[in-house]
Amino acid sequence: MKNSLIIVRVQIITLILLCCTVIGATAAVTPIETEMADGGKAVIIFASGPLQAMIEIPFTIELKSKAGEMIEDAELALDLTMPFMPMPPNNPKAVWKDNAYRGAAIFTMAGAWQVNVEVNHSESGTEKIIFDIEMVIMK
């Protein structure tokens, strides 16, 4: 009887730890995907979830052509803005490193945001991509 009670307790603790791990893993990033003009795909992945104001949040941007090939040689210019109010310039840099464009963003207040990315690529020219962020919360 005592051994079976110990086994049940161990199983419950294991289940709780597993649930906490899964919940933590799914809440750790915020990916946002949009289509590119040529039918390719652009994804920005923030290393935080939910997104919070006034903290530095690392991000990666992946650009894939219609054929599914990674676009590695583009120059990116970013502008973080709130679509419903004027904002001062907020232009984080994104550089190619470890198979993605990497940088860090700081959202200066809570609310809806947009990440406007101008992609300059020698083969396809200039394209503007918009990532809509539904909500950034207060820290």
Image: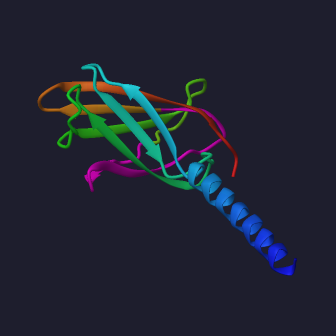
Q: Residue at x 27, y 56 (%)?
A: 98
x and y, in percent, of residue 25 in the image: 57, 54
How many marks on residues? 0
Answer above or below: position of 25 versus 64: below
Residue 21: name its quadrant. Answer: bottom right
- Image location of residue 49, percent across then percent down: 59, 48
- Horizontal relation, residue 138 to residue 59: left or right: right
Question: Magenta stretch?
Answer: 91-114
* Magenta stretch: includes residue 17: no
Indicate whether 10 appears above or below 124.
below
Q: How is the image coloured?
A: rainbow
Q: Residue furthest front?
A: 1
For the residue pair 139 and 71, the one nearer the viewer reads as 71
Residue at 64% of width from left, 42% of height from top?
A: 109
In the displayed orientation, state which residue is furthest to the bottom: 2
As drawn, which residue projects farthest toward the right? 1
Image quadrant holding the N terminus, namely bottom right
Res. 124 image quadrant: top left
Depicted 26 relative to depicted 127: above or below: below
Residue 35 versus residue 46 in the image, above or below: above
x then y, percent, for residue 44: 42, 40
Say which residue appears at 68% left-offset and 59% top-offset: 20
Q: Position of residue 26 (x, y in %)?
A: 58, 49
Residue lying at 60% horizontally and 23% vertically, measured from the top left? 84
The furthest residue to the left: 123
